[in-house]
Image (cartoon, rainbow, N blue to C red):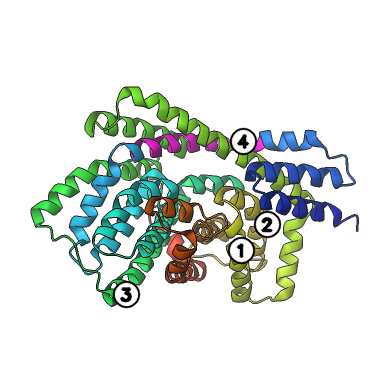
Amino acid sequence: MLETLPIIVLVASFALMLAINVPVAICIGVSTLLMLLATVSDASAVTMARDIAEGMSPDALLAIPFFIVSGMLMGKGGMARRLIDFANALVGRFPGGLCYVNVLTCMMFGSISGSAAAAVSSVGGFMIPQMKQNKYDADFSVALTSTAATTGLLIPPSNVMIVYSLAAGGVSVGALFLAGVFPGIICGLALMMVAGVFSVRRGYGGSYKASAAEVAKNGLQALPSLALVIIVIGGIVLGVFSATEGSAVAVLYSVFLTVFIYKEIKFGEIPKILLESGITAAIVMIIIGCSKGMSTSLTAQMIPQKISAMLMGISDNMVVTLLIMNAMLLIVGTFMDMSPAILIFTPILYTVFRDIHGIHPPDLMGIPAEKWLPIHFGTIIIANLCIGLCTPPVGTCLFLGCGVGKTKIADTAWKMFPFFIAMLVALMLITFIPEISIALPKWLGLL
């Protein structure tokens, strides 16, 4: 009983505080402290404070506030509208063209801003009213936007990949960035296919037929925004700068683009943007610190090893274990934000993921297992938790989408099921075909 008491205290206190809407960072910190106090060791609040400080100390985390600033600058600087115009010129002519425009823009904007919430607000603020005007169902439009916005968390640069790198013990951020490209594209294509089927069945037509000259013009206007990804990822891959330095470059480029080129942000607005970014970054860092404290405490209680043994006891079949692991993450994603979920469950479930590959895991594409396994698991956990951003009770993208589209959450949630199925199919492909994640970093020499 004494061995299980700390875990009972942790789970019960965390669930209770979450149920009464206590902020997730406080839920994590307080429940971990209560667990430490319930142990028979000398662990105390001092231990928790030390773990929180250590959790926020890695240099790699400096990239997160920089990318947050860059994303806010781009979100307020007219980038979304230019990307929408470009996507509309490319695919707006097809049946259901606005659906493809929506998904394509969310993929591009989400990757540049690194924020699914920003993609819902910026892209949805323009696309959802436009889809309504063209007689697309309002709940359908919100459901599509909310799910498509999550694709940008896989396509680099991505803050959650930096968080995963920390949780996984220092995995290459550059390799992770590249590993998310193909999975993100697959998720976007899956959503497009579902939207296309519904558009044909419901008679949603193309809204805009652009000439070649218009495609070229809109492409040139959007090119400076898209160049941010090329500059940041290219610089990291070529070794010009690290991921942290790349995030600082992203801020400088965003200021130059939005203030001097697009001229949609004035110098006087920058302090307010920095303040908003600072508040967001502070919340993220507190969550990271508290989550690190919980992860360390769980490891001290041998929880990863116990869960691994339990799952391996259910079945030693790799397919079955991977399905169970994904099911656990899908449940976690419905009530926990992505960053704390990654920090807490990566050490736990990566142990399972590594163990099911055997004592001597095989090489893949000539890459040693100790290099490709954490990269592959990173794309799995991120793709999985993206689904949770669209599901109640903690579906950030769903709530924002309904707010932008002025729809009811209950009505929109039902319209999301076909898109959930598409995302689950993409998740299964990512899970069981590791080459999807590994190929690009391998080809570009980061693995």
Residue 98 picture quarter? bottom left
| Residue at which label 3 appears | 197
Q: Please name the amino acid that badge 1 sits on.
A: Ile
In this rendering, which labeled residue sits more in front, label 3 or label 4?
Answer: 3
Query: Which sits in the foreground, 294 or 266?
Result: 266
Q: Please name the amino acid that badge 2 sits on.
A: Ile
Task: Quote the CA–CA distance across marks 4 and 1.
Answer: 27 Å
Report the magenta residues as a range. 54-74
| Residue at which label 4 appears | 56
Instruction: Find out whether residue 212 is within the magenta segment.
Output: no
| Residue at which label 1 appears | 331
| Left or right: where 21 falls relative to 182 | right
| Residue at which label 2 appears | 348
Task: Quote the CA–CA distance across marks 3 and 1.
Answer: 28 Å
Query: Which sits in the foreground, 357 or 260?
Result: 260
Q: Going 35% across and 53% down the picture, which residue do you hit?
A: 106
Q: Percent x, y for residue 182?
A: 39, 60
Task: Quote the CA–CA distance across marks 2 and 3.
Answer: 39 Å
* Whether residue 69 is visible: yes
Element at label 1? helix
Q: Going 31% across and 45% down the picture, which residue do you hit?
A: 230
Q: Percent x, y for residue 364?
A: 50, 65
Q: Earlier in the sequence, mark 2 or mark 3?
A: 3
